[in-house]
Amino acid sequence: MDVTELGYGRVLLTVSASRRSSWAARRAPWSPTGGWRVRRQRNNPRVVIPVHDQNPARRTPHVTRLLLALNVVAFLISPLALGGLGDSSVQAVCDVQAFFDRWAAIPRELTTGDPLPLVAGQAALDASGNPGCLLVRPDYEKIPIVSAVTAMFLHGGWAHLLGNMLFLFVFGNNVEDRLGHLRFLLFYLVCGIAATYAFAFTAPT
């Protein structure tokens, strides 16, 4: 994205065609006849996908189920739920960017403690006719440290969501069984916050 001055205090965040098409391209490799397809990588000819484990749990994994539900609901109410199904319009990209500006953990915000002064707004055209998102002042108050928690429940697309939830479903119950409900929840949150801040300070821009 490029930033363009429009005059009268307005700024346009230009969205390239490749950026718009990338939202449509972020789809899970599904075919109606073959189901989920295994992606072949250059140096790793096969990708192993866990289906289940053989470690019976003594406790009912209430926290794991709650985390699964929260992650799925958070994704379904986000603009990415529709964007990942092929909506690659400029407004869809702006809606996704605005959603992340509000709820995602942004490294510069975490390292400085100050939220961004301008966030993505409505779709617009610059003087040359290039599409983009207007940068506007946010109409909400964002607390950067809280975004380190909300970001743990955000996903970049259906494949990202389903992959993470599969691993949480398969392995989460065993970790919860070993640690207990409360300690597992604390472990989940502390590790997520620590990883978010570690990434922010290693890549602050």
Image (cartoon, rainbow, N blue to C red):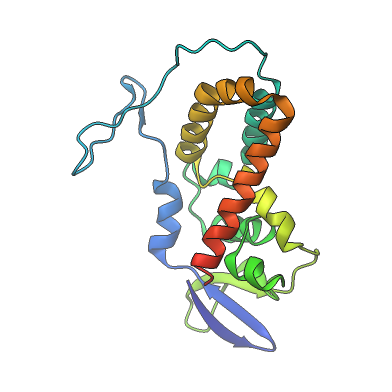
Q: Nearer the viewer, residue 135 or 54?
A: 54
Q: In this figure, what is the number of numbered marks?
A: 0
Instruction: Please identify the residue farthest to the bottom as the structure is shown.
Output: 7
Residue at the image position 63 percent from the left and 73 percent from the top: 134
- Which residue is more in the foreground, 155 or 174? 174
Write down the quadrant of residue 98 in the picture. bottom right
Q: Position of residue 11 (x, y in %)?
A: 62, 81
Q: Is residue 56 depicted above or below 130 in this figure?
A: above
Residue 95 seen by the camera: yes
Q: Position of residue 146 (x, y in %)?
A: 74, 55
Tell me residue 5's x, y (percent).
Answer: 58, 86
Q: Is residue 120 visible?
A: no
Report the residue at 72% width, 59% height from top.
145
Image quarter for residue 37? top left
- State whether residue 120 is above or below residue 62: below
Query: Picture coordinates of residue 123 (x, y %)?
Result: 60, 66
Name the residue at 60% across, 45% down. 191
Q: Is 18 left or right of 166, judged from the image as shown? A: left
> In the image as oriented, which residue stretches furthest toward the front?
178
Q: Is residue 78 above or below residue 45?
A: below
